Amino acid sequence: MSKYDYLVVGAGITGAVFAHEAAKVHKSCLVIDRRPHIAGNIYTKPVEGINVHVYGAHIFHTSIRRVWNYVNQFAEFNNYINSPVAIYKDELYNLPFNMNTFAEMWGVKTPAEAKAHIQKQIDAEHIGTPQNLEEQALSLGGRDIYEKLIKGYTEKQWGRDCTQLPASIIKRLPFRFRFDNNYFNDRWQGIPMGGYTKMIERMLGDTEVRLNCEYKDLIAKEPDIADRVIYCGPIDEFYDYKLGRLEYRSLRFESEILDEENHQGNAVVNYTARDVPYTRIIEHKHFEFGTQPKTVITREYPADWKPGDEPYYPINDDRNTALYTKYEDLAKGEGKVVFAGRLGGYKYYDMDKAMDAAFDLVERELGVHIGE
């Protein structure tokens, strides 16, 4: 007989939600993760009394009521509002693009003036049907916005010139004709007080967790360890890449402790010029209004992905979408394995969307409905 009802591969959001709900209906779970810690990419660790977002900034935001109600069972959220700023050469602008941005860039004072300025720049480009990302951005926002706030940042993110990127990457530009620096439009927003790791710890509760544990090594030793498997790892890795490798963009982080109380005055500062190698600097203490005598900053560098690197962002182009579909077809033939999460489904999720998808998984697999 199997030792567990479920083996959950991955101790991030999806795995933690599933394990918590399985325990409530008296299903035994073993959660494993190849990393030495729980919480996946939302893992936070204390450094100098500051909760450091080890895998990049994560701000919880949602308009999904059942997600907000659910997550508040496990954490108290502060009232942090994400209001990043962008630095281009010696100029500083508020994000998202809003009246503060336009006032700084052009000296305009009213929405009508800003709209007129943007339209004049769009008209000057004489673009019909955009053929690449550069033309798409110019046709939506004009030359100044593109050159100062889009071009360099995007090229660093993708590792390619904007003229080599498809127009479809930018479907619209989020212009906001109000003096409003709140980056998100969602109803609820904040950071869990005490960090995300504590939140995931509470979700996992008494569920058994094994870290530094590889799925294939475990299955080789104990092939019948569980009746069912919730697999949140890379779907192509599960099949030993026999159809080919799915591609990702990756990230590299450089963190340092500074002997100063306040380095940049904001949690997130983007650097939009191409000649600055990193895309942003994160000052972690500002996520929780910290008053510690020192500070921790992290520079974030986009990186080409190669096997062995951490896969962050699926590249959902034609080639990878077609390859994922083939793996998805293979997965349909698995009797006891269910693929889930960002890597299992080869799909980028915001945290709230990952949680909502996990609720749907719980309903399909456990018959438990998580309502409003």
Image (cartoon, rainbow, N blue to C red):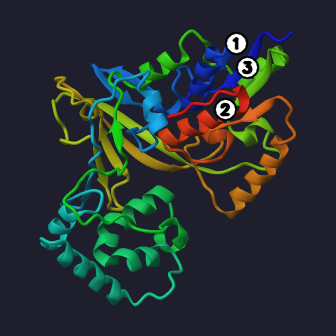
Identified at 82% across, 14% down, the residue is 222
Mark toward the start of the polypeptide (2 vs 3): 3
Foreground: disc 2 or disc 3? 2
Is 52 on the left-hand or right-hand side of 3? left
Residue 175 or residue 368, whichever sits in front: 368
Horizontally, residue 143 falls left or right of residue 7, namely left
What amino acid does circle 2 point to? Glu
Residue 30 occupies quadrant:
top right
Q: Residue at x 76, y 16 (%)?
A: 5
- The one of 91 and 277 positioned closer to us in this rendering: 91
Q: Secondary structure at mark 1?
A: loop
Give the Cα distance between marks 2 and 3.
Answer: 15 Å
Judged left or right of residue 41, residue 260 is: left
- N-terminal of the two: label 2 or label 1? 1
First in sequence: mark 1 vs mark 3: 3
| Image quarter of residue 75 | top left
* Residue 18 at x, y percent in the picture: 62, 25
Disc on res. 363: 2
Residue at 52 percent of width and 76 percent of height: 132
Q: Nearer the viewer, residue 112 or 259?
A: 112
Instruction: Examine the rendered structure and indicate whether residue 264 appears above or below residue 15.
Output: below
| Amino acid on which disc 3 is placed | Tyr
Label 3 residue SS: strand
Q: Amino acid at mark 1?
A: Ser
Residue underneath mark 3: 6
- Residue under pointer 1: 28
Marks 2/1: CA distance?
A: 17 Å
Give the distance between the C-alpha atoms of the residues marked 1 and 3, in whole angstroms: 6 Å
